[in-house]
Amino acid sequence: MTRTVVLMTALVLIFMWLGSMIGGAEGMQTAFLIACGMNFFSYFFSDKMVLAQYKAKEVTASTEPELYAIVSRLAQTANLPMPKVYIIPEQVPNAFATGRNPQHAAVAATQGLLELLTPQEIEGVLAHEMSHVRHYDILIGSVASMFAGAIAMLGNAARIAGAGTTDSRGNGRSNPLFMLVGVIVMPIAATIIQMAISRTREFKADEGAARLTLHPEWLMSALSKLEGYAKNYQMQRATAQTAHMFIVNPFSGFARQFSSLFSTHPSTQARLARLAEIQKQLR
């Protein structure tokens, strides 16, 4: 958790620094107020927006008894309120959790996931999502994603405004170094920080799932299947802004071509290795 706090603080500082580049002290104050507004918006509305984006449909114990029973059992074991349960009309197997806190949480699985995995593997996946709920990971990830996007927009504004800096003689010309940092370096740094936050929380959720079910092999088997599928098929409505929410990166086939610094998820090999270590501990 300490690492996440440090990374989130870094995002806020980058955001405020870019604001000061554009508008000085007033720009920094404005950036801070915008940051507060963004946090408020993410806190209350990010869950509704993402569920609507993927056309998720809520199910109940009467409409989807097996799925609902799995989530209910996990919620009781984790001592969490029962979240709302959704199915996404999508054949590519994947799942995510959303909600600002355990009292306003939801878990969603695609139709393809329910058809591909065994009941034990589904339980491993949903235990991972319940772990995200327990640790407030979705709120953290949503805020980080919004900050990274806003920093990119500020960087573009700095380019248009000439960053509002002066040279050593104070003649009002733009400083090329500050322009380079503001327009290119800082947005890239913000993206790397956002991805680092996401990868950290995925490892934590994997561990939480393993300890919740006491069967790490369920999640290990599910991850292997999901990763293999994601490398060849892409979800229809997947976006870069919501990729961090899913149990496997919906852009796995594309993301593997780039550095792990820009990946929302750790490699499946690394996740399986950590789960194998936890399996030894549980035995």
Image (spheres, helix red, strand yellow):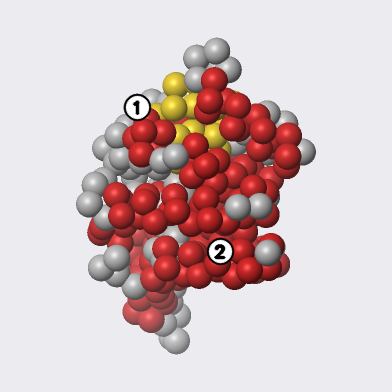
Tag 1: amino acid: Pro
Q: Residue at x 34, y 27 (%)?
A: 89
Residue 88, by quadrant, is top left
- The residue wearing badge 2 is 275
Q: Secondary structure at mark 2?
A: helix
What amino acid type is highlighted by mark number 2? Leu
Left or right placement of residue 84 versus residue 179 in this view: right
Q: Is residue 170 visible?
A: yes
Position in image of residue 257 (x %, y %): 25, 68
Does 166 appear above or below 246? below
Measuring from the top left, give residue 1's x and y in whole percent: 69, 63
Q: Is residue 172 visible?
A: no
Residue under the image location 52 percent in, 28 percent down: 67
Q: Quadrant of residue 106?
A: top right
Earlier along the polypeptide chain: callout 2 or callout 1? 1
Q: As rendered, which of 175 and 128 lies closer to the eye?
A: 128
* Percent position of residue 155, x then y: 39, 62
Identify the residue position indicated by label 1 in the image. 89
Measured as percent of width and height from the top left, residue 239 is found at 34, 45
Q: Quadrant of the C terminus?
A: bottom right
